Image (cartoon, rainbow, N blue to C red):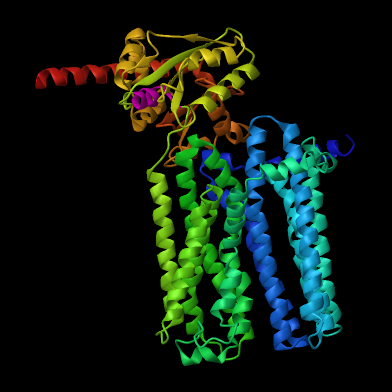
Amino acid sequence: MKRIDPWFERAAKSEDKLVSFFQCVVTGSMGRYFLYRLRNVVILDTLMFVARAAEFLLVYRLLGHVDAFIVLALRVGSLLVDGAWWGFLEVMRERLRDLTEEGRSQERDQEVGNWIALTGLVAATFLCAAILFIVIEILPLEGGAIVAIYSFFIFLQTVAKLPVTTIHSGMYATRRIFRPSWSIFAPLVIQIAILAIGYAILPTAALLLSILAASVASIVLGLRYTLRVYELSGRTLGSVLKPVGFSTFLKGLPAGRAALSLLAGLCLQLDAIFVLILLGSVSGSAREIDFTAADPAWHIINAFAFFYLLLPALTGSYSWARVFYFDFVRLRRTEEYHALRRSFFKRVIITAMMIATWFWLLGFSLGVLQMIDFSFTLQLALLPLFLLRSLIGVYQFRMFADERLLSVVGSVGLFALGLWLVWLDPQPASDLLEVTAVMIVVLVALINLHHFRNRRQVLPVQLDLAAWFETLRAVERPVFVGELRFAPHIPEIQRRQVISAVRARLSGHGHYAFRNQDSLLFFHRDVVKAQDLDIDLSVMSGGATAATRHGDPVFSDGVSAATVLLSRWPDMQQQVARRPIDEQKSLFTAMFENGGFVDLATGEGSVGMKRLDPGITRLALTTGLKSYRYGKHAAMIRDHVLVPVLCQGALRLLLVLPPEAGRDALKRWRQSLAQRASATVAEQKQTVSADG
């Protein structure tokens, strides 16, 4: 408690400094959220650019061309290993998310422990292979001692990152890990400082000490703040370092899914190989892809040095998108956030253009400061490359977070095919122009895949009542329809368990909706599998619910089922008559001038939400959706009533009633909507009669 209490005191003081994603959505301050999330990443990638440039200049000064290429190739290889392992861990992260949602905390800790054990085996094997490679391939070279030691440090840094990444992912799967900015920048600042100080005094010692000190600082600081979050969440590293049933865990590991995740993670880092191949750094071929072939003036620069130094800038132009990985996953796993997911991704795309331009300017400054007779036209020709790579990277990270791993791998396969076609052209007008054209093709393919997925929106299992009846009417074959009524005064935890069971049984086969807080309606398209489903769910709940049937639960089609249900509850006609979103907004603002609302698809109304207390706006969206998930028409935060409004299964509006509106305000608003719906239905009937 002595350690935790001061931490909570500091957290309370800095709470207002934290920028909440959902608060910024509600108040229309997404620009502030983007600045908050990206400020450290852009600075970090810029420092990485400086550190790699300083390291390269020192390596090139101390070692020959061949030895320098070996060291730099190992640096590139470490990026590939990092990316592949991060992708491989997606299997663990997704499993942890499922366990957390189901409340199985003990199994969650066992899962992390088994993954850490697996990481230890992989790291030990990798390190042994690395030492063998150094002894056989590097030590015999001229000047091999320095190269061997430096190579060993690179391998050691890469191996040490594996368990750190695993431990970090074990918590990052379900919650963010906040750490002070200085702890993020410190390792690179230390490396740059050592290289700068030792450049003229002891360059060899500076080269070796810089990577060692930076690695230790990165690992220690990363573990420190990750383990603090473990501790504050009631978990300790000791609780997850005890693998249980490791052999069973290995047998149950989905090999195909794991291999695909690893390959997708590797594909996200292929810029590393991309640079080496395009430079023609591997000689011996009569045909080499060369970016500097279009203009004789471009041949003046050292292409290998320039493009290697450009690698951190090219990588930084898209790797920042990983910052939004947590948001992408959270929006993907919450089906009701479909409208929000689309608007958020549009903002990410716009941001990609600006960040790509910034990193292109870094490359421009590199050419001006370090390259003799550097060609400005070459740098201008590289601008489309940066813009395209940034956009491609954003789409790839989005697809990775959406578990569309084949699309990520396929996009890189398409890119490799394009490069092969470029290579087949023996006398191209410009390799740079052709490679840029290949990237345009890849980007167009990714855009089409993305929008094709959006057009094929899959409805959530839970729907609002109007969408549920619309979907039921669209069923043209026999359908099983049932109703579950909750027992009076049912405990909240038992209610949630029943809802989770209904969701699991209907997933992929049907939908459910709450008729009111005491009962839910559901239908199942497979009448064979759904036989006595309502009774089974009632028995499964241990008496918490009762199955209620309205005639034969199997109907000939959805229209007949909807007709029977609506004839039983005539008043429901008004509830299922969908009112246009604009009409609901106008009626709300007319009735509650001091109230607030936000349209998640357009952002309308968010400015008015800023006048509410930050404590309300920070929790409004998640609280409103939570109330809908558990069958409640509204939620309460302090004195404000929150009303979620859904459209086709997606959360579209969030209404916030003013405290002075009174307890019956929500009822009056719903009655006004119902009256308008009744008037509309009456007008439609009159029109039909007149036409008849």
- Can the viewer see residue 12? no
Q: Residue at x 82, y 76 (%)?
A: 135
Give x and y (percent) for residue 425: 41, 82
The answer to if 466 sits in the magenta stretch is: yes
Eyeballing the image, is 40 above or below 531? below
Give x and y (percent) for residue 192: 76, 72
Q: What stretch is highlighted in magenta?
A: 463-472
Q: Quadrant of the N terminus?
A: top right
Q: In which quarter of the image is the C terminus?
A: top left
Q: In this view, does 120 lie to the left or right of 493?
A: right
Residue 127 sits in quarter: bottom right
Q: Is residue 114 left or right of residue 480?
A: right
- Can the viewer see residue 292? yes
The answer to if 347 sits in the magenta stretch is: no
Q: Is residue 321 left or right of residue 15?
A: left
Question: What is the tally of numbered marks visible in this picture?
Answer: 0
Q: Which residue is drawn at 80% across and 59% down?
A: 124
Give x and y (percent) for residue 247: 76, 43
Residue 87 sits in quarter: bottom right
Residue 55 sits in quarter: bottom right
Give x and y (percent) for residue 244: 79, 38
Q: Which residue is drawn at 36% across and 24% down?
A: 472
Eyeballing the image, is 678 above or below 103? above
Magenta stretch: helix, strand or loop mostly: helix
Towards the viewer: 377 or 210: 210
Q: Which residue is drawn at 41% across and 28% down?
A: 589
